[in-house]
Amino acid sequence: MSQTVSKRQLFEWLAAVFQEDATSITEDRARETIPTWDSMGTLLLIAELDDRLHVTLTEDELKQLVSVRDIVEALRQKQVEVTD
Amino acid sequence: MAEHDVARMRRVLAHFMKRTETELEEAFDEASLPDLPALMALRREVLGPELTWNDEAYLRWRYFARSEKAPENHLWIFRDRSGDVLGCLGVEPVELHVGGELVPAFRYMDVMVQPRWHGLGLGAWMNLVLQRRYPVGMVVGATRDSYNLIRRVFRALPERHSWKALIRSEDYLRRNAPRLARLPGVSAMMNSALDLRRQAFHLRRSSRIAIEPLATPASEEQGIAGLDRSMASIGLAFERRTASYLHWRYVGNPRRQYRFWAARRDGRLRGLLITRAVNTRGELVDWMWDAAAPEAERSEMLTALFLHGIAQLAPEGVATAWTRTLDPFSERIAARAGLRLRPDRDTVAIYAHSPARQEQLASARWFLTLGDSDDD
């Protein structure tokens, strides 16, 4: 069964993972501007996506993630509908 | 860090490593001598093939030589099923002077992860596992990739400052004033001016301060114990230094060569400076001073030591002298000795299982030097 999540909800989850203010997570936000998106942040991100959406990314897919937009695209590739 | 988050990280890492969570825990264990080839392979991959030291000798000295003079260091490694070492993390037992007590702690060092596994949390995981094992820990010089670790698992201390002094002008002129650099005599004149500046302080300083080289700190057991006690007595927090430890750490170290300078007044040891040259960079690695002496006296003594150490680095072919500081007194001395404050900082962090101890460590007045890093 495919999952659906709004961007607003997704960005709130990301804000919690990265311990950032929810309003600061936007699709344009680059990984390098989020200090808490380091290797520990990556593990916690994966855990969150698994817990919330039952999505697992491979190492190669993870290494491609350099922005919030990439996370949105990666979820869409996994048949998760990310709505505006 | 919340246990819930640790459990989630364990689950995800086990998935990436294609292990069960139990297998993940069991794959992280203390290294022993038979692991040396696999360890050296990991270090070659991370540090590059062109090491300037004998890495086997370094690992044996740091982690596997057991003698009464050597601290009981441990190296933890994460193995894959084939026996390759994918990550490692070393710990050294230290004693911290804090609030009139000596607190046993562990200094984390030599953290490494195989490049293929960079960015996937293995380093953070190793830190978390050891944090459960060792009640008090300290990590110095964290990287950008350990931001979360420092902020969520450890407590960050004030950042260490970086200082630099020019010893030889040739490289500086080539980079910043290439036309000037090509004029005959300009760099020689600038070098003379730099030397004169240092000499000027020596001419003004008290003739009662004598600075001499030491072959080893081991010859100054009582003196170093006295300096250590005096620094602790003024409420500084720092790693306890003993003559035998400094001898093991800096004389026995197969990776680098160190020089030792003693400052005496009225025949008594009043200060100690340890320096090294790493390629064209001279470093003031560690120092101690008689904190019981009057301010003017200890300031003059330590400044003289710094200047002497820098001057003695010049014949070793270094172009600059560097150091790191984290206490106001040392920073005043660095400035007096002609070192310039640089914009780069690095992070030092601590943790303790006891919240009261962690708070005590986090709010202490720390004295930290380059010697507290693990790049020796």
Image (spheres, rainbow, N blue to C red):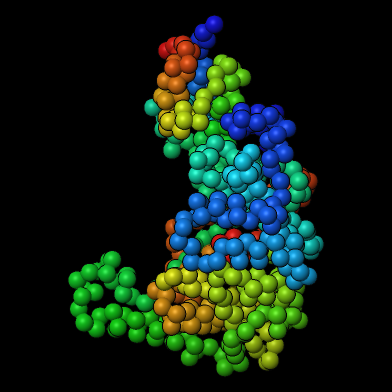
What quarter of the picture does the N terminus of chain B occupy?
top right
Q: Is residue B184 visible?
A: yes
Q: Residue at x 57, y 65 (%)?
A: B376
Residue drawn at x 59%, y 60% as measured from the top left: B374
* Residue B75 found in image quarter: bottom right
- Toward the top, the furthest residue is A1
Residue B287 in the image, given as x and y percentages of width and height: 61, 73
Q: Residue at x 51, y 35 (%)?
A: A37
Can you tell which quarter of the image residue A48 is in? top right
**Location of residue B325 with respect to B305 vertically, above or below:** above
State whether residue A6 appears in this view.
no
Seen from the viewer's position, the closer of residues B166 and B79 is B79
Q: Nearer the viewer, residue A75 or B114?
A: B114
Q: Nearer the viewer, residue B47 or B271?
A: B47
| Residue B49: image location, x then y, percent | 46, 58
Q: Position of residue B339 (x, y in %)?
A: 46, 71
State left or right for residue B80 relative to residue B99: left
Above/below status of A69 relative to B343: above
Report x, y in % for residue A5.
50, 12
Q: Is residue B134 above or below residue B225?
A: above
Q: Residue at x 61, y 66 (%)?
A: B57
The relative height of residue B236 versus residue A82 in the rendered view (above or below) is: below
In the image: residue B372, left or right of residue B183:
right
